[in-house]
Image: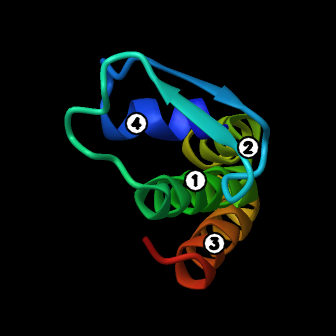
Amino acid sequence: MICEAILKIKSDAQVSVSGVDIDDCVIEWHDGNPTNITKEQIKSKIEETQYARQREAAYPSTKDFMEAYTEKEIGDDSTKWDAYVIKYNKVRTENPK
């Protein structure tokens, strides 16, 4: 996760990490860390990534979308579509970007 965060900050960073906790890990910069990425920046990117993953997982599934949309458009029954929209909007409200 630490390497992933570093690469999100600088996609061509050359780095290896020993440990899984950002506070206790050892980061070896093979490129000298030319942009001076700090552990605070890495922590922030880890939190941002975790939040985005949690938000994405909270949304109704694509399968739910397809089924609800199909029933609304083809079957003229918007019951599942209305429920889908409520769930979708709830995630957006509870997890703003």
- Give the image location of residue 20, x and y in percent: 78, 41
| Badge 1 density bin: few <14, some 14–19, many ≥20, Cα 10 Å | many
Q: Secondary structure at mark 3?
A: helix
Q: Relative to the observer, which residue lies in front, 5 or 97?
A: 5
* Amino acid type for the residue under numbered disc 3: Val
Distance in Å between CA atoms under marks 2 and 1: 24 Å
Answer with mark 3 or mark 2, whichever residue precedes in sequence.
2
Look at 61% across and 62% down and name the residue there: 51
Answer with mark 4 or mark 1, whichever residue precedes in sequence.
4
Q: Does residue 8 lie above or below 16 as drawn?
A: below
- Position of 19 compared to 87: left or right? right
Distance in Å between CA atoms under marks 4 and 2: 26 Å
- Position of 65 compared to 80: left or right? left
- Give the image location of residue 65, x and y in percent: 65, 44
Answer with mark 4 or mark 2, whichever residue precedes in sequence.
4
* Amino acid type for the residue under numbered disc 1: Ile
**Are dots 2 and 1 in contact, CB under 8 Å?**
no
Point out the frontmost of discs 1 and 3: 1
Distance in Å between CA atoms under marks 3 and 2: 12 Å
Q: Does residue 17 lie above or below 60 as drawn?
A: above
Query: To which residue does mark 1 refer?
Result: 46
Query: To which residue does mark 3 refer?
Result: 91
* Amino acid type for the residue under numbered disc 4: Lys
Distance in Å between CA atoms under marks 4 and 1: 9 Å
| Badge 2 density bin: few <14, some 14–19, many ≥20, Cα 10 Å | few
Which quadrant: the C terminus? bottom left
Look at 58% across and 53% down and name the residue there: 46
Query: To which residue does mark 4 refer?
Result: 8
Look at 49% across and 52% down and name the residue there: 42
